[in-house]
Amino acid sequence: MAKVLRSKVLGFCMGVKRAVDMAEEVLNENEGKEVFMLGPLIHNEQALQALYDKGLHLLSEEYIEERCNEKSIVIIRAHGTSPSILTRIEKTGARIVDTSCPRVKASQKRAASYSQDGFLVFIAGDLGHGEVLSISSYAGDKAIVFKDAEEAKTFFKTSELFQKNPRAFDKAILISQTTIRKEEYDAIIAVLQKKLPQIEVFNTICSATKERQLFLRELAHEVDGILVIGGRHSANTQRLLSLAQELSPHAALVEAVHEIPPEFFRLEKVGLTAGASTANKSIDEVEQKLLEANTI
Ligand code: SF4
């Protein structure tokens, strides 16, 4: 194996880097205090382990009252959380460090202000995802979530309110999960604009995912195989893997160096890309391991 090439854009996105930097700062400045993160800060076991090693504890919502007090610090992750959870933490006296990504915050604010003005807030995304849960919570009972165009079509076919009183939908906006694929969002937009021509549509897709995919396409032309470094539970890492599999006969996802498939040590040129929650350290380790094989 002769060469390792990195994608021009890979690894931590702005929001995840900001969240990890803030968490590290809090841990460094508050030695001896109980510092919690509400849900995993990022979808990357190695990066999480590094934070656990520095004293960070994972906190589930159901234990907020039991485990937090005025001496605790609770870190809110980049996906954000709901106003009711923030209130519950505040009531315990714990200090909140909110690392919500500014792009997610912008969607939360939009959902809150439009719903207060009587607008329905349609959200395109996965209801099980932390970011969508947090954005929809800011719109309260005005939020309606679709994961794809089919769900949107079914909603309009089956909604009694829409059949009886379509005027109730006169004021409506559409925003998306920041990591939704453009094609998926376009399909949902098409369904909603057909039913609600007056709907106000906002482009809230984050460029981080798109850029990583764009530069992976470029990299694929120059290499014989692609390693995608990142967590198996990370949606954007999985998307990179499926694209890598489309583009290259050799593609694999690795969370750590020991997972590099043996065939990659025999390739002439290996390309590296990494999900938005993959730390530089993990990328460096994989690159180093491949390069070491040259010297054996
Ligand atoms: S993918 Fe985009 S929206 Fe999500 S955390 Fe990263 S920068 Fe923020």
Image (cartoon, rainbow, N blue to C red):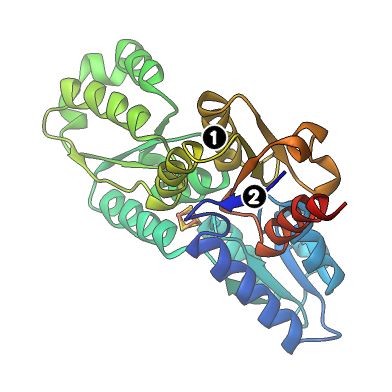
Asked whether 237 or 16 is in front, the reply is: 237
Q: Is residue 266 above or below residue 245?
A: below
Q: Residue at x 64, y 69 (%)?
A: 20
Q: Position of residue 88 (x, y in %)?
A: 64, 63
Q: Residue furthest left?
A: 198
- Circle 1 sits in a helix, a strand or a loop, which is it? helix
Tell me the kind of residue under disc 1.
Answer: Arg
Asked whether 135 or 13 is in front, the reply is: 13
Asked whether 80 or 277 is in front, the reply is: 277
Which residue is disc 2 drawn over?
A: 3
- Res 123 → quadrant: top left
Q: Residue at x 32, y 15 (%)?
A: 153
* Mark with earlier residue (1, 2): 2
Which residue is disc 1 drawn over?
A: 239
- Circle 2 sits in a helix, a strand or a loop, which is it? strand
Asked if residue 254 lies left or right of residue 271, the reply is right
Q: Position of residue 133 (x, y in %)?
A: 52, 44
Real-space Cα distance between discs 1 and 2?
A: 25 Å
Q: Is residue 154 above or below residue 283?
A: above
- Res 94 visible: no
| Mark 1 close to ligand 1, CB under 8 Å | no
Q: Is residue 65 above or below residue 277?
A: below
Residue count near mark 2 (Cα–Cα under 10 Å), binned few <14, some 14–19, many ≥20: some
Tell me the kind of residue under disc 2.
Answer: Lys
Asked if residue 200 lies left or right of residue 61, the reply is left
- Res 98 → quadrant: bottom right
Q: Residue at x 76, y 86 (%)?
A: 30
Q: Quadrant of the N terminus?
A: top right
- Res 236 visible: yes
Q: Are marks 1 and 2 in contact (CB under 8 Å)?
A: no
